[in-house]
Amino acid sequence: MLPLLMIAVLGVHLLAVDLAMAGPLVAVGLQWRARRRHDAAASALARRLAGWSMAAAVLGIALGLAALVLTPHVEAEPYRRALAQISASRWWFVAGELVFYFVCMAAYVGPWRRMQRWPRWHAVLAILAGTDLMYHFPPLFAVISTLSLQPKLSDLPLIHALYWKVLLEGQTLAMVLHHWLAAVSVAAIAALLLATGRPSELAVSLGASKWAARIALAATLLQLPVGIGLLLALPGALQNPLLGDDWVSTLLFGLSLVMALGLMHHLSVIALGDIRRGAIVRTAGLMIATILLMAATLQHARHRALAPSVAAVLRPLAPSP
């Protein structure tokens, strides 16, 4: 029961933090479109998306704390050791980054009309907020995931040099890029849902909806080469369950790929102009299913990889002197 709860918590947490990270950046793109095309609906959509991003950040924080509570009962010991390598000072730094995000977003959303006089400074606030989360959180947890597969590094403090050494590994970089692209896709699909939320604004929002669908489609298509690179960079203990060594991991992985292909098809149709709400809701459902299945795949494969018999033979990185 607890593993299923952990998968649900992680899946919704990923959706929430993806929107919180990339939502401000997509809002800036909508504002840019609104100024160029004199599209008032796109500007209103940008503000609503920014508000949703702040709410998603609150939800993401709450679910992240819930995942930390569940970790000792669900995650394997190597992952718990890697998580314990984060010092208290780094956690305080994480809290400070979250405060910075909310300050920037409050200044971006609150005085909306007044800030229209300074469009560049207005956009800078959202860019600072979004990139703040993107720069700090996906890399940090990708490093933790990589460290859990490196037993010889599990007793070392996560100092600056070790952090960057692990971050620059191919597996870690591919994982970070994978999270960034997923965040852009989630935020753009959230904009699609908001754009068709009011039937009276449907005709005015046609251009903005097609633009958001193209952004989501581009980010999802880029996941193909990034996903292949990530799969090739994974250690054998984590790669083999996905490629047939464990039928549950392989099945979950295959289902997530099918959902991703369906998502790309639906986004292509919307990008060509079919912005009926039913089509957009189905697209959002496919996106949610894809992320939940990916979370389940990662969770199950990681448990297989971090089993004591497997973790003992993982080839570690050589620690720096």
Image (cartoon, helix red, strand yellow):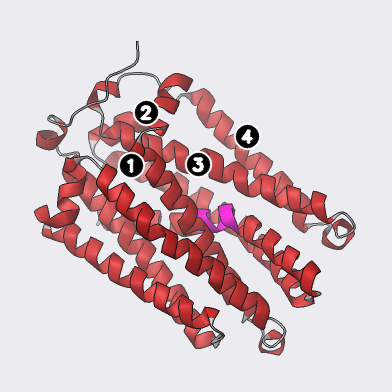
Residues in magenta, as a range: 16-22
Q: Residue at x 30, y 29 (%)?
A: 81
The residue wearing badge 2 is: 84
Residue at image location 52% in from the left, 81% down from the top = 270
x and y percent of residue 195 in the render? 64, 77
Pick out the residue farthest to the front.
225
Question: Which of the marked residues, 3 or 1, is nearer the chain's N terminus?
Answer: 1
Residue 45 drawn above or below residue 99? below
**Spatial CA span between label 1 and label 4:** 23 Å
For residue 2, say whether it is visible.
Answer: no
**268 shown above or below 222:** below
Task: Say what amino acid the circle numbered 3 marks.
Answer: Phe
Q: Which residue is mark 1?
A: 71
The dominant secondary structure in magenta is: helix
Label 2, label 3: how many angstroms apart (C-alpha)?
16 Å
Indicate the quadrant where residue 313 lies.
top left
> How far is disc 4 from disc 3 in space, using C-alphas?
12 Å
Going from N to C along the chain, the mark reached first, 1 or 2, is 1
Q: Which mark is residue 137?
A: 3
- Picture layout, residue 165 above or below residue 296: above
Figure disc tally = 4
Looking at the image, which is closer to me, 91 or 29?
29
Amino acid type assigned to the residue bearing label 4 in the image? Gly
Which residue does the numbered mark 4 point to in the structure image?
96
Question: Which callout, 1 or 4, points at the residue further toward the start of the chain?
Answer: 1
**1 vs 4, front mark:** 4
| Residue 73 magenta | no
The quadrant of the picture occupied by the N terminus is: bottom left
Q: Nearer the viewer, mark 4 or mark 3?
A: 3
- For image coordinates 17% across by 42% down, the residue present is 236
Q: From the top left corner, tell me how far across and down residue 116 is, in percent.
A: 86, 60
